[in-house]
Amino acid sequence: MESARTRPSTRINRLGEKQSESRERLHELLDSTPLATVALVRDGHPVAFPTGFARIADELVIHGSTGSRWLRALTDGASAAVSVTALDGVVVARSGFESSFRYRSAVVFGRFERVPDDQKLDYLETLMDTFIPGPVAELRSSSRKELAATMALRMPVESDNWSLKISAGWPEDPDDDVAAGAWAGLVPLTTAPDVPAHTPLPDSVRAMTGTLRNMAAHRA
Amino acid sequence: MESARTRPSTRINRLGEKQSESRERLHELLDSTPLATVALVRDGHPVAFPTGFARIADELVIHGSTGSRWLRALTDGASAAVSVTALDGVVVARSGFESSFRYRSAVVFGRFERVPDDQKLDYLETLMDTFIPGPVAELRSSSRKELAATMALRMPVESDNWSLKISAGWPEDPDDDVAAGAWAGLVPLTTAPDVPAHTPLPDSVRAMTGTLRNMAAHRA
């Protein structure tokens, strides 16, 4: 097992009051999305790969082709930083300075190891079942050839190799900004996936949220 | 300007047919979300920081406190990989092997530079206006003290320092899997932000999507 000394610090420097030590909240975030971004160093450069992942018990599990260069770098022992973020909304304050995002963000540091062949099928099926709950039992079994072309990698989530930052509060506007009477609030960021990129927000919703306009439409 | 040689390759090794060279599609992705994950190397280790960003013309722009250690590492010249991903759904095939995610993913490589003081206010206001379209004009102006505590960083998006991967197709199930009559399709991944984590999906929606169950409920 790798010692904490060989890893980056998990202490959050800025806005340290947002750091959470709660394993339960960590799992909640990790279980809420299948998307992680894995950072590693290649030829001295930082590189980043988005990938599907699942938390299975106390491990982060990813998978992919045995021909993947970045996965092979990981199984060869490259250090990794696994970043998982949920962006929950925009906090609109009375000033730009106090405005911020509402988010939950975790980074897990460590090294992945290749799941041994005799456990691979179990890991892959559990992974598949978290990506798309249900169908594993309905799909045809993986062929020997498919299994041979796929590898699963796991990284332990230990007591000290992760950090979690949760921004869930309200703006801390100075009293005179509050007294000036401007609106403040939370604007959710999620648009349904079947809404085309340039669809403007209806006036009714705009009125409700006060300020939101369709970002894509605005910036196109 | 940094030469391409000092950067990681932007050629995609696996599933190279998904690589897109379209600057328009790149901008579309960058403009669709304010969330980027910035990877850099610190003390030899990869580290990753989620952050709000905006594409402003041909630059990626981020901002933060002048006291932020990782932003200072960037302004001191650290190489960065900026990863932006949209996860659009899960493609359910007739086998686990052919199942996949539908996603769009970009990485931009390079170095950030600090925006000079005489341009900072413009950058910050444009950034704010992409995060929350509209209110810049309505909010009180930033104070001199607030501006002094904030820095803006920019990285050029050039002709050759980015890669874009778009997975938008359907499973390539072998003929005998298709003939076996199993369902295949796309399961969208987005749940409205005000739905509590453990809410089960109603039967009607489950029936429509065929297989989807609420991930959080399933994995809790």
Image (spheres, coloured by chain):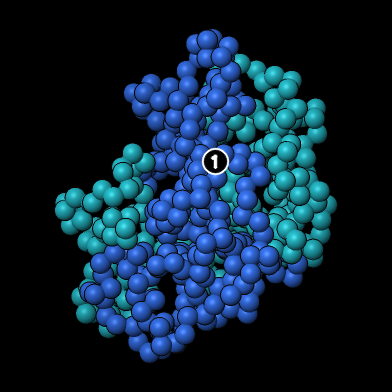
Chain colours: A cyan, B blue
Q: Quadrant of the N terminus of chain B?
A: bottom right
Q: Is residue A161 visible?
A: no
Among the 4 quarters of the image, the one containing residue A56: top right
Among the 4 quarters of the image, the one containing residue A120: top right
Q: Please give the name of the residue rendered at 36% of the width and 61% of the height, measured from the top-left corner.
A: A90
Q: Please give the name of the residue rendered at 74% of the width and 36% of the height, measured from the top-left corner.
A: A66
Q: Quadrant of the C terminus of chain B?
A: top right
B169 vs A80, left or right, is left
Mark 1 sits on what residue?
A: B18
Q: Residues within 10 Å of mark 1 (few under 14, many from 20)?
A: some
Choose between A48 and B212: the one closer to the eye. A48
SS class, disc 1:
helix
Q: Is residue A214 visible?
A: yes
Choose between A36 and B125: the one closer to the eye. B125
Image mark 1: chain:
B
Q: Is residue A172 above or below residue A143?
A: below
A115 vs A104, left or right, is right
Q: What percent of the width, then of the height, locates residue A129? A: 58, 29
Q: Please give the name of the residue rendered at 72% of the width and 26% of the height, measured from the top-left corner.
A: A147
Q: What percent of the width, then of the height, locates residue B219? A: 55, 35
Among the 4 quarters of the image, the one containing residue A9: bottom right
Q: Please give the name of the residue rendered at 46% of the width and 58% of the height, measured from the top-left corner.
A: B35
Choose between A129 and B60: the one closer to the eye. B60
